[in-house]
Amino acid sequence: MRVQDFRLGRSRVSTTSSDFQQNDGLKPMLIRFRHRTAPLALFGLLILAGVGAGDLSKAAPSKPKSTKALFTESCAGCHGPRGNGGSMGPSLLTPRAKTLNRQSINRIIYSGRPDLGMPAFEFTYSRDQIKALAAHVLKLQGRGAGKAKRPIKKGKKRRAALSPAEQASVNRGRQVFFNEARCAECHSVFNYGGRTAPQLNRFAKRKTRAQVLEAIVNPSAKIALRYQTTEIVMLDGTVLQQWSRNIQPKTLELYNPEHELWTTYFKADLKSVRTLPESRMPANLLDPLTEAQREDLLNFLMTLK
């Protein structure tokens, strides 16, 4: 029962002056009684309202969960209780995972990786809890609070520094990416942009300039397995087309871009399931751009390695 407002009145005892004259001990008793009436009245109201000692104990704040409990609750289901991977997520103990520093891990937990099926936890946990989870991942990796150490590859050449003219072109290409080309409506670069398409942080790492151009002009020519589109038709005729994963004989998971989560569907509840040969990315997105804008955009994308 919700009590919006109540007031406690003071109890009064009627006496005469003769009473005080006859018994001087009555006055101290009345004073003590008057001070005790408010707590007694409150206790009586609580009893009438059905609030017992057990209910009051339930209202007490619960003990904060430990970082290990938070990891078990939200991370271990995919990455394993010790971070060594599971059926739903990769291991956090690989050499590549260990190249991430504390800030990078913190950012991934906060913003998620929707292109890989990892939800964001910005609205689930506080900033301090997310920082604690990042520290826990470092602890699982045996790094404690230490800094990430990138593996040194012998013979690896450093990327040549850009000339002022080349850097200016890259800067213009970044503006084209976020504005005229509208790439950021779906894609993101270092957590800036859309969440309905893959992140492009390392898009050009193993691609030539010609391959990057082909991926934009003809996106259906080569589609990575994890970005293939699956179409499902539900019993009521509703059609959904999205990325899929964990396709099993009786179930499959479809990405939900609105909530940045994966949803499980039972095939018994579907009319049909099929993989589409076309990419969800439209072709010929460069057509509205000028030749100079295309060059600048490609120069920017080639820096994403």
Image (tube, rainbow, N blue to C red):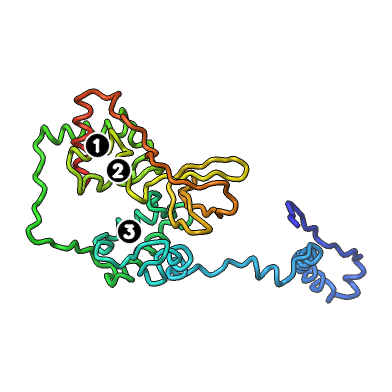
User: As shown in the figure, which amino acid type bears the numbered disc 3?
Assistant: Ile
Q: How many marks?
A: 3
- What is the CA distance from the residue labelled 2 to the residue labelled 3? 31 Å
- Front residue of this view, candidates 299 and 232: 232
Residue at 32% x, 48% y is 224
Residue that carries the numbered disc 2 in the rendered image: 222
Q: Is residue 71 above or below residue 164?
A: below
Q: Where residue 199 sits in the image (x, y, percent)?
A: 32, 46
Q: In this picture, is 123 found above or below 67?
A: above
Quick one: SS at disc 1? helix
Note whether residue 141 is visible. Answer: yes
The residues bearing labels 1 and 2 have C-alpha atoms spaced at a distance of 9 Å
Is disc 3 placed on a helix, strand or loop? helix
Callout 2: few (<14), some (14-19), or many (20+) C-alpha neighbours within 10 Å? Answer: few
Is there CB contact under 8 Å for labels 2 and 3? no
* Disc 3/disc 1 C-alpha distance (Å): 32 Å
Determine whether, in the image, residue 154 is placed left or right of residue 13. Answer: left
Q: Nearer the viewer, residue 139 or 218?
A: 218
Neighbour tally class for label 1: few under 14, some 14-19, many 20 plus, Cα within 10 Å: some
Residue drawn where x is 11% and y is 40% of the image = 162
Q: Nearer the viewer, residue 119 or 122?
A: 119
Whichever of labels 3 and 1 marks the residue nearer the N terminus, that label is: 3
- Contact, CB < 8 Å: mark 1 with mark 2? yes
Residue 105 is tagged as 3
Dividing the picture into quarters, in which one does residue 52 lie?
bottom right
Q: Position of residue 246 (x, y in %)?
A: 44, 57
Q: Name the side, left or right, on which 156 lies relative to 194.
A: left
- The residue that disc 1 covers is 214
Image point (91%, 70%), residue name: 19
